[in-house]
Structures are given as structure tokens and as C-alpha cells.
């Protein structure tokens, strides 16, 4: 299910930054182009309690666009910020209700400050799968030791195991996705990689001071990424590509990647991004070689213990 679409559209700071009719047209255009994976979460929760309506707007727009539920894959999120006080059944009821659907095809479980009770997490996700509220699950930026424990417990108990890991992965940030603690699971086929934060909130595209909230600066390397931005532009030009196409092709050319998440707010951005598919197919290895020296998080621990 995860590999059905090479690209996925993310919802954080996306649909609530657009005019509604533009969102409707963009969704229709995406699905018609084969982009059928949508990462949609309830972001008015925990540290994201910012009154975001992006999930509600997505549900309204996808219906207005006439897109049947069976024609797209919905990937939701289950947060561990307040777990287990905020249980998965209640979270899904709220999230799915806001979107206006009965089930998520997949859920990503993640983001925690304190290490959760792994057997309880695996067991409760299994209950939601049995109840038909989701079809499978993955993890988001877990400590590698916790992922190992989840995989082992699921196998021992005969429960559904995580199928993928949603990790920060980009030209500049490669530590976890390419490091041994996660790579061993990608190599064995137990997990696929879902690449997120691939543009560094626009910094890799030349926006040195993003106007909106962006992902955490793990390792404190964002200034180095800003400094490298011009060189990324030069390398993109060498391949006759845009910065966005280069950044996406870099991710697509990494074998464990099942799909790449990005957010767009204009149709022309989507069209431009789609050009990365051919670029990766024709020049993926060359692109990765040309960008090898721009891995800027070498000092960040690959096991997620930041």
C-alpha cells in the first residue's frame, strides 16, 4: 500500500495556507497525475496545538474534488505526546471525524519526549487494525532501540509490525535514514522508508528565512544548510533541473525510499516536482554522487538519540 504512489502530499502548513478552490483543483490534479498518498494529521494537539484546520480542509476539499475514498491512500498520525492518557482509539475517532472518513489506510505513530511502553503501543495499534480503523502502521523518528523492540514484540506475539519509517531525509540530513540502526531493517525488507522534510521547509529551495513554522533543527545545522543553498542551486543547474527536482530526485534514488512527502500550495509547484521522477530515473546515481559532500549531519547520531 505504501509504494502505490512515489510521492505523497503532506498536510502540515499546507491546506490551511491555500484558497479552498485552489486546494480542490490541486488535489484533483495530484490524483490524476498518480499522486495518491496523502499524509493528513490532526495538528491541534500537544506541541502542535495551534488551532490548525488543515485536516478538516483536506476532507472538505477531497470531497469537493470528487475523489472517491478508494482512489487515494490516507496516512494519518497517532501522537505519543500524551500517551497513554490520550489513547489511540480516541485519537483516531477525533482525527477521522475531522477529515470525514471512517478509516485511515495507514497511520504513523510517533513524536515522543519520554520513551513509551512499546508492547502497549504495538498492542493498541493492532486493536485499531482489527477494528478496521486503519490498515497498517509505521513509526516517525523513533529511537532505533524502540523500533527494534516493537518489531521483536510484534513478531513474537503475532501482531502487525510497523511497515515503514517516516524519517527526516534530504540532501543535508541523512543520519538516521542512511545510518546502520535503521538501514539494517531497510536492507532486510522489514521496513520501507518514507522521506519527509525533504526541502527543509524551503531552505534547500533557496528560502533562507522561511515565513512559516518548519521542522525541528536536529543537530543545530540549519545555518550550514542555508550556507549550502547556493551550491545546491548550482548543482541543480548542472543537471538542467530546479532545486526542488534535484532534492526530490536525490531521495527517490535511495533504494529504501518507498515514497517522498512534500507540501505544495500551487499547481505549478506540483508540476515542477513531478519532473523529479524522470530526473531520478535517468540521473539518480549521478545526482547522489554530486551531492555526496553536502551531507551536513554527520555528527548527528543515527539511532535517533538526539
Image (cartoon, grey):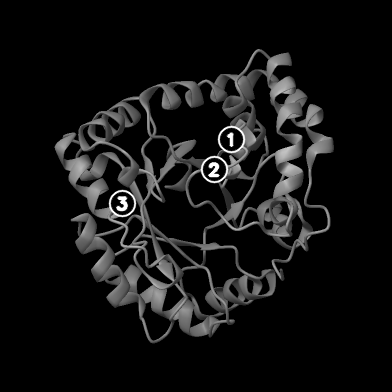
Q: In the visual, does 61 lie left or right of 127?
A: left
Inter-mark Cα distance, 3 to 2: 19 Å
The residue located at (83%, 58%) in the rendering is: 299
Image location (x, y in percent) of residue 6: 49, 36
Image location (x, y in percent) of residue 258: 55, 43
Q: Is residue 283 above or below residue 55?
A: above
The residue located at (54%, 74%) in the rendering is: 112
Q: In the visual, does 213 lie left or right of 115?
A: left
Q: Secondary structure at mark 2?
A: loop
Q: Residues within 10 Å of mark 2 (few under 14, many from 20)?
A: few
Q: Is residue 209 above or below residue 286?
A: below
Report the residue marked by disc 1: 207
Q: Is residue 44 above or below residue 6?
A: below
Report the residue marked by disc 3: 54
Q: Secondary structure at mark 1?
A: loop
Q: Secondary structure at mark 3?
A: helix
Inter-mark Cα distance, 3 to 1: 23 Å
Image location (x, y in percent) of residue 97: 20, 63
Q: Is residue 143 above or below residue 249?
A: below
Is residue 114 or residue 160 the one in the foreground?
A: 114
Report the residue marked by disc 2: 210
**Is any atom of residue 132 visible in this view?**
no
Q: Residues within 10 Å of mark 1 (few under 14, many from 20)?
A: some
Inter-mark Cα distance, 2 to 1: 6 Å
Q: Quadrant of the C terminus?
A: bottom right
- The reply to whether dot 2 and dot 1 touch (C-beta < 8 Å) is yes
Is residue 244 or residue 205 the one in the foreground?
A: 205
Amino acid at each position: 500500500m505504501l509504494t502505490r504512489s512515489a510521492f505523497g502530499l503532506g498536510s502540515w502548513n499546507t491546506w490551511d495556507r491555500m484558497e479552498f478552490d485552489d486546494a480542490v483543483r490541486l488535489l484533483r490534479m495530484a490524483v490524476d497525475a498518480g499522486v495518491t498518498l496523502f499524509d493528513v494529521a490532526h495538528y491541534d494537539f500537544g506541541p502542535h496545538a495551534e488551532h490548525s484546520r488543515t485536516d478538516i480542509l483536506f476532507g472538505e476539499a477531497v470531497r469537493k474534488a470528487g475523489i472517491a475514498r478508494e482512489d487515494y491512500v490516507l496516512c494519518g498520525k497517532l501522537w505519543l505526546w500524551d500517551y497513554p492518557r490520550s489513547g489511540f482509539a480516541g485519537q483516531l475517532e477525533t482525527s477521522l471525524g475531522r477529515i470525514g472518513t471512517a478509516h485511515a489506510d495507514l497511520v504513523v505513530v510517533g513524536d515522543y519526549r519520554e520513551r513509551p511502553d512499546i508492547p502497549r503501543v504495538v498492542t493498541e495499534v493492532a486493536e485499531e487494525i482489527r477494528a478496521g480503523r486503519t490498515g497498517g502502521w509505521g513509526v516517525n523518528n523513533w529511537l532505533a532501540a524502540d523500533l527494534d523492540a516493537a518489531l521483536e514484540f510484534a513478531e513474537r506475539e503475532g501482531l502487525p509490525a510497523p511497515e515503514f519509517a517516516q524519517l527526516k531525509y534530504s540532501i543535508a540530513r541523512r543520519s538516521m535514514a542512511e545510518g546502520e540502526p535503521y538501514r539494517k531493517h531497510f536492507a532486510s525488507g522489514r521496513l520501507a522508508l518514507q522521506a519527509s522534510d525533504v526541502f527543509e521547509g524551503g531552505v534547500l529551495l533557496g528560502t533562507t528565512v522561511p515565513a512559516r513554522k518548519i521542522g525541528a533543527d536536529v543537530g543545530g545545522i540549519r545555518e550550514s544548510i542555508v550556507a549550502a543553498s547556493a551550491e545546491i542551486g548550482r548543482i541543480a543547474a548542472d543537471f538542467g533541473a530546479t532545486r526542488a527536482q534535484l532534492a526530490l530526485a536525490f531521495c527517490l534514488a535511495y533504494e529504501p525510499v518507498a515514497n517522498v512527502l512534500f507540501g505544495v500550495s500551487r499547481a505549478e509547484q506540483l508540476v515542477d516536482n513531478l519532473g523529479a521522477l524522470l530526473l531520478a530515473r535517468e540521473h539518480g546515481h549521478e545526482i547522489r554522487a554530486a551531492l555526496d559532500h553536502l551531507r551536513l549531519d554527520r555528527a548527528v547520531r543515527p539511532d535517533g538519540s538526539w
